[in-house]
Amino acid sequence: MGDLWIGNVEESTTDDEIRDFLCRYGFPPYDSIQRVTGTGEHPAAVVTFDSIEPHVLRTFQPRIHNMFWKDRTLVVQVMPERSEE
């Protein structure tokens, strides 16, 4: 399982728009999404891919990191693996 942090997402962006954006750049559809509001200035989303390992996501990440989308520059990182203990 791999998680992808997408930071600085325009606040009004829908989950479907994020899914379509990622698919346009070669990502498979994500399995779940969690919104992170933070301080409100740079909202983010964490998308989870149940069947994709983090090392695979790292090959996709440069496609969209620092991309200008919806009047914002995205910050995209692969989250460290987490233990499911």
Image (spheres, rainbow, N blue to C red):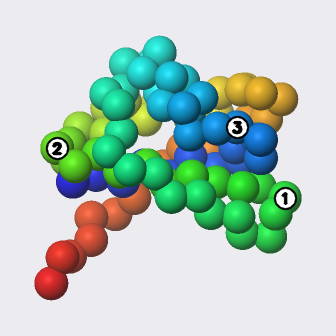
Residue drawn at (62%, 63%), measured in percent from left and top?
Answer: 36
Kindly report which numbered mark, 1 or 3, lies closer to the viewer in this rendering: 3
Kindly report which numbered mark, 2 or 3, lies closer to the viewer in this rendering: 3
Q: What residue type is labelled 3?
A: Thr
Q: Which amino acid does label 2 sit on?
A: Ser
SS at badge 1: loop
Q: Is 21 on the left-hand or right-hand side of 68?
A: left
Gap in Å between the C-alphas at discs 2 and 3?
25 Å
Q: Residue 41 carries which label?
A: 1
User: Quadrant of the image for the N terminus?
Assistant: bottom left
Contact (CB < 8 A) between labels 2 and 3? Answer: no
Gap in Å between the C-alphas at discs 2 and 1?
32 Å
- Neighbor class of circle 1 (other Cα within 10 Å; few <14, some 14-19, many 20+) is few
Q: Is 52 on the left-hand or right-hand side of 6?
A: left
Residue drawn at (79%, 35%), measured in percent from left and top?
Answer: 72
Q: Name the residue under label 2.
A: 51
Residue drawn at (27%, 71%), measured in percent from left and top?
Answer: 82
User: Quadrant of the image for the C terminus?
Assistant: bottom left
Q: Is 13 on the left-hand or right-hand side of 80?
A: right
Gap in Å between the C-alphas at discs 1 and 3?
14 Å
Q: Is residue 64 visible?
A: no
Residue drawn at (84%, 58%), measured in percent from left and top?
Answer: 41
Q: Picture coordinates of residue 53 (x, y %)?
A: 19, 47
Q: Name the residue under label 3.
A: 13
Taking the view exactly as shown, the residue that stands out farthest to the top is 24
